[in-house]
Image: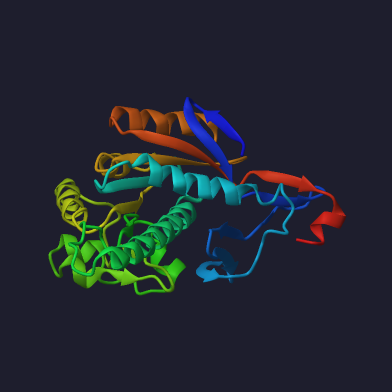
Amino acid sequence: MQHEKANGFPAMTLEPEIKKNGEEARPVPVRLATKREDALLSREGGKLIAHITREDFHDWPAELAQWRNDLQCLAHNLLFAKKDKTPCVIGFASAQPGEGTSTLAVATALLVAHNLSAAGEIFAHKHAQTSTNAKHDGRRETQALLIDTQLQHPSLHRLFGVDRASGVSELLREELVWLEALKDVPRSSLKLLTVGHTHAKSLHYYEIARFGELLRELKTQFEFIFLDLPPLLRGIEAAELSKLCDGVILIVQAHKTKREAVLAAQRVLEKAEVDVLGCVLNQRRFFVPDWLYQRL
């Protein structure tokens, strides 16, 4: 796995793009290999489709499978870095829109949820073997939650094909309780909280404070909470939301994001005293010969 340094942050390279002899790059579907089955993110009609498949991708060329290992590494690092049962809020942010923040937030959340679910099954099996009368140790049945906080450009409801309504905006207006707002993700233990319906383009200060209260309540029910954050350089909202996170992962799109923008985003996070867990270099391009391109 190729690790790099991006402005002092630990970094990894994800989501390669394939380019044929100078032609426009063609994104490769993001396939996330897990121990028991593969999660597949693919693009159909311009939309990102997330689902689970058992199709085997292990015969892919090694250089194209690199991102699978990196995504697994990212998910495992988050799992193993949290040594206790304290709930953890992780934010995904970028300097500008269109850098793949939502895609990688979805991918990581699906993988973490899958691993937590598998671990829960193992625990339940051992628990049943030891004693049917033993007390439960407090593990949460539903352990991972993904929240869309991008009021201006929400996307998670489209990615998963669910209704945008009954989400964060309605919760902040106290029109419903969070149990009524949670949405299921097909074939996954991951839960989703959409952005909801609102005409506002950003959260006001009092709404961010109320969102912090909501997060504290959600942390009593979920082991991991992932936030799809707004772009850091499009207002103070992202920085304020980042302060509510235990850590933030900075997404940088290769060959697009300018160094000055990355440095500016870094300064925003540093000023907010946010713990930056690392930087992900997204959509790095690989140039391949015709014979290999035809097999992809």
Residue 199, horizontal then vertical, whole percent: 27, 63
Position of 3 with respect to 64 (left or right) is: left
Which residue is the extreme one toward the top?
8
Quadrant location of the C terminus?
A: bottom right
Q: Is residue 165 above or below residue 281?
A: below
Residue 144, horizontal then vertical, whole percent: 33, 58
Quadrant location of the N terminus?
A: top right
Q: Is residue 101 visible?
A: yes
The answer to which of 277 and 129 lies nearer the viewer is: 129
Position of 283 with respect to 23 (left or right) is: left
Which residue is the extreme one toward the front?
130
Residue drawn at 31 percent across, 71 percent down: 183
Residue 37, horizontal then vertical, whole percent: 54, 65
Residue drawn at 26 percent across, 47 percent down: 85
Residue drawn at 70 percent across, 52 percent down: 25
Q: Is residue 74 above or below residue 196?
A: above
Colour scheme in use:
rainbow
Q: Is residue 231 visible?
A: no
The answer to which of 127 and 9 lies nearer the viewer is: 127
